[in-house]
Image: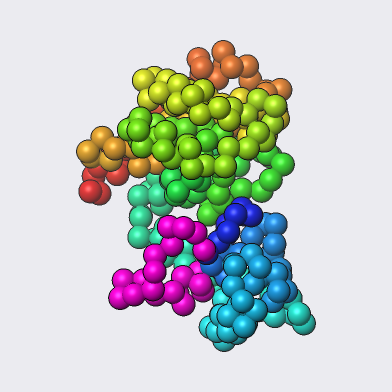
Amino acid sequence: MNQHSTPLLATEETPRPGDSYVQSFARGLAVLRSFGAQAPQQTLSEVAERAQLTRAGARRILLTLLQLGYVEADGRLFRLTPKVLDLGYAYLSSLPVWTQAQPLLEELMQALRQSCSATVLDGDDIVYVVRLSAHRTMSINLGIGSRLPAYCTSMGRVLLSNLAPDALRARLSSMALLKITPATKVDIEALMEEIAQVRRQGWCLVQEELEQGLIALAAPVFDRGGKIVAAINVSGQTAGPSVAHLMEHSLPKLLETASRVSALIRVQQ
């Protein structure tokens, strides 16, 4: 679920109700997205505020979701139920390549003894479609469906490198570029150059920009047309293998695995 504190419903770009836009459905999704790691359970008032709805509107949607089994109530508090996972599973089950690719990523994890993940780009975020943890590398728990900012992550920069320069600049300009750690790059020109370098070299290394002590190395996954459709990475602690060791031992295996996953995707297209 969305973990950001930005408005979940009303924006200047929100379409107007009409034949091609069902406002009540959009509001229902906003209510679902209002829950997350920072708000695992909420009162009616909190849901209304986070989803930018009236209390009456939020109440109608919550009661509908309650009857459908997507939320449960405990006194004044509402929380999501496991049935919500059906929505995410529908996406993953429509992309069987990730089921087939998981053994390749498990093989990479075992070979390098490092956590391994695969993500796709969704707006300003990366979304995890595979997450294999060799050991605890981050202070936050990550799993399938978890979201992280694209601008400060190795996989995010790989995915953003697929954008043309003008589109990339526009995307970065629309993002909330927060300095999460002292090392986080938030200057648009610096990010443009960083991502251009990722595009030229075909991989990305990020050190301590998302979390202090975390280092990650990512590579692109391509479709038949040569478009980057996903990214995979390996990650660990800066107290572990040196950057030189990662470049010498981890990068070749990571690139080989990315090539094998790309081949799976091309076969299914």
Residue 239 quadrant: top right
Q: Which residue is drawn at 60% across and 54% down?
A: 6
Q: Where's residue 238, x and y in %?
A: 67, 23
Residue 153 quadrant: top right
Is 87 rendered above or below residue 182? Answer: below
> Which stretch appears magenta?
10-29
Residue farthest toward the front in the current orientation of the protein: 12
Is 95 rendered above or below residue 258? Answer: below
Q: Which residue is drawn at 55% across and 27% down?
A: 187
- Total labels drawn: 0
Q: Which residue is drawn at 23% across and 48% down?
A: 269
Q: Where's residue 4, x and y in %?
A: 61, 53
Q: Can residue 162 be seen in this view?
A: no
Say if the magenta span includes residue 40.
no
Q: Is residue 191 visible?
A: yes
Q: Where's residue 243, x and y in %?
A: 59, 17
Q: In this view, does 237 lie to the left or right of 229?
A: right
Query: Which secondary structure is most common in the magenta stretch?
Result: loop
- Using the image as rendered, state which of residue 261 and residue 238 is in the foreground: 238
- Using the image as rendered, state which of residue 215 and residue 56 is in the foreground: 56
